[in-house]
Image (tube, rainbow, N blue to C red):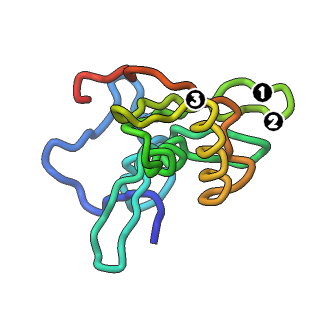
């Protein structure tokens, strides 16, 4: 089962408002799922009962009217044998509204060229998600920017 991660009970240290904008706090965290605190994250529960966070639900790109989480695409890209890590962003597209742009860091000595990798990733994403989700651009890079927490 997959869906939005929501919490039914308050906990110590939980946010209770947003400074000078309590209405925004209510609209963001309490209104989407009445009776629950909406964390903003997606989650997948396995058949064994384990929970796996799938990423922020607000990191969405809209490709040809289809809402698609960037974390969902990154997960598929990261399953490719040559990919060490990836990042997916949306970019303005004249026809589709937004298109997918994938940045990848390759594993050492993977032996893949950018063209071969792009073709394989487009096929993989088309099979695992949908044709519309296939990236228009795949760019190989040496590093991805990181937040302080990684």
Q: Which residue is drawn at 26% across and 39% down?
A: 15
Q: Mark 1 points at which residue?
A: 93
Neighbours of disc 3 within 10 Å: few (<14), some (14-19), many (20+)? some
Residue 47 sits in quarter: bottom left
Look at the image and tell me whether residue 30 can be seen: no
Neighbours of disc 1 within 10 Å: few (<14), some (14-19), many (20+)? few
Comparing 58 with 92, the one in front is 92
Q: In which quarter of the image is the C terminus?
A: top left
At mark 2, the secondary structure is: loop
Q: Name the residue under label 3.
A: 114
**Where residue 106 appears, x then y in whole percent?**
41, 33
Viewer-side label of 3, 1 = 3
Question: Is tag 3's residue or tag 1's residue first in the polypeptide sequence?
Answer: 1
Q: In this view, does 76 lie to the left or right of 145?
A: right
**Where residue 121 appears, x then y in whole percent?**
59, 44
Q: Mark 2 points at which residue?
A: 96
Label 2 to label 1: alpha-carbon separation: 6 Å
Label 2 to label 3: alpha-carbon separation: 24 Å
Kindly indicate whether the residue at mark 1 contacts the one at mark 2 (C-beta within 8 angstroms).
yes
Comparing 139 with 90, the one in front is 139
Label 3 to label 1: alpha-carbon separation: 22 Å
């Amino acid at each position: 089962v997959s869906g939005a991660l929501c919490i039914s009970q308050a906990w110590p240290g939980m946010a209770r408002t947003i400074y000078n904008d309590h209405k925004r706090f209510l609209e963001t965290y309490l209104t989407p799922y009445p009776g629950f605190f909406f964390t903003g994250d997606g989650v997948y529960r396995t058949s064994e009962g384990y929970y796996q966070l799938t990423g922020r639900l607000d990191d969405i790109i809209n490709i040809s009217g289809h809402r698609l989480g960037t974390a969902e695409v990154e997960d598929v890209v990261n399953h490719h044998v040559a990919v060490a890590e990836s990042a997916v962003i949306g970019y303005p597209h004249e026809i589709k509204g937004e298109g997918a742009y994938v940045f990848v860091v390759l594993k050492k000595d993977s032996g893949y060229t950018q063209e071969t990798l792009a073709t394989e990733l487009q096929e993989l994403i088309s099979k695992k998600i949908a044709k519309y989700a296939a990236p228009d651009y795949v760019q190989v890079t040496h590093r991805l920017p990181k937040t302080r927490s990684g």
